[in-house]
Amino acid sequence: MMKFATRSTPLLTTAMVLSCVTTPAAAQTVTPLAEARLRWEHVEQQGLPQDSDAVTVRVRTGVQVSEGRWSALAQAQGNLAIVPRYFDGLHGAATLRPLVADPQSIGIYRAQLRYADPRLAVTAGRQVIQLDDERFVGAGTIRNNGQSFDAIRVEWTPVAKVKADVSYVWSVRTVNGIDGRGARPRSIGGNTVLANLGWETPIGRLTGFAYLVDEDEAAVQGYRLSSQTYGGRFAGTRKVGVAKLSYQLSYARQSDYHRNPNRYTADYKLADAGLDFGGPRVGAGYEVLGASDGTPLASFQTPLSSIFKFQGWADKLTTTPPDGVRDLYGSAGWGWQAIGPAKAVSLTAVYHRFESDRLIRHYGNEIDLLATAKFGRTTAAVRYAGYRADRLFTDTRKVWLQLDWAL
């Protein structure tokens, strides 16, 4: 059952301030915000007696008011389970059905004040933060409740093509919704700093980053997800004959931070390239989340990322195993601008081979398939993920049918 918090919080104070500053005036621009999602997610997992079937409706609505360089935004979200035959992480038994991490919830998704001029932007309050490809910091958009941050964010462009992006985060609002508790809390407090410095070069964007993640909740892995990560990333595109070549290279080193009782260092490596021929496209990559000595949670972790985008859609590797993971993957697809009434039609297939970083053992393989198309303001998607286990986890299959509408 959903419960509503009654305790006064800084966020409620922020929301009240927003309600005051968003009174329409002649010089203001008022932009309504509305979006909806209808989804069926089906999961079969070997070893569990029942499958999961989750039919959910997610609605977000709000308003943004702008005047000159200032803006205020407030947006609420609610998630309703029409068919609740699934384990949402909070209700039901994990020994009966597979996890679909979309618990019913209602609450404030974003509530922020923002100042922006051509060189400086400052955003304060509950907000979405997506850095680079979201490998380390993202919005978790696949889950209905999403992930947002109670934070102050400063984006500064001191000179052309150079941008500093620094956030102080005091609370991470998780995908677990308002009933979140224990190891799956509603929010995770701490003093987290996210610093990102990027330079647009003629051949791509070069980024250096420092992410000091303080997950100061004992129930969340006993503080073992607190880490400090320093690294760099280079990503760009260029024309090669009739094709567009895209490429990424990244390296980072992570170690324990703040109250983390583990003492470890682990490396992250990524090399990725793709070719788009204006219809057909192919790509390949190799990603490594390294291990230390095999101690649980002493491997490279990314608790603030949009993890679904990486290492397969079956969600088997949302937490990096003690021996790390090496992901060798390849993709192929085709895109069309339009097929009849359908616009931006896309077909994609991805294959992953997973191995441990330490001791080099084969974990398993995964095949992911995706078809998407737009019909006016609605995007339709059909998605499949199939994980074939070898030495880690169990065979798992997932199917999604999804409609997204946005104003």
Image (cartoon, grey):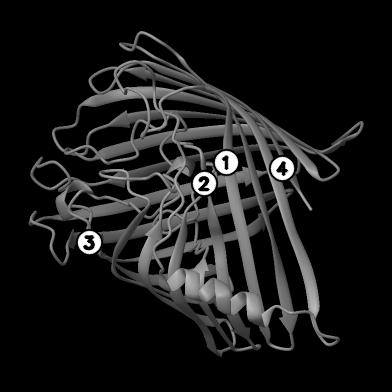
Residue 353 seen in the current view = yes
Pointer 3: what residue? Answer: 216
Q: What is the C-alpha distance between the residues marked 4 and 3?
A: 47 Å
> Between tags 1 and 2, which lies in front?
1
Q: Amino acid at mark 4?
A: Phe
Pointer 4: what residue? Answer: 277
Q: Quick check: marks 4 and 2 in contact, CB under 8 Å?
A: no
Looking at the picture, tell me which residue is in the foreground, 190 or 7: 7
Horizontal and vertical percent for residue 146?
51, 49
Q: Answer with mark 1 or mark 2, whichever residue precedes in sequence.
A: 1
Looking at the picture, tell me which residue is in the foreground, 275 or 241: 275
Q: Answer with mark 3 or mark 2, whichever residue precedes in sequence.
A: 2
Left or right: residue 7 compared with residue 341: left
Label drawn at residue 145 = 2
Left or right: residue 288 compared with residue 333: left
Q: How many marks?
A: 4
Query: Callout 4: few (<14), some (14-19), or many (20+) C-alpha neighbours within 10 Å?
Result: some
Residue 201 seen in the current view = no
Q: Quadrant of the N terminus?
A: top left
Q: Secondary structure at mark 3?
A: loop
Q: Amino acid at mark 3?
A: Asp
Q: Quick check: marks 1 and 2 in contact, CB under 8 Å?
A: yes
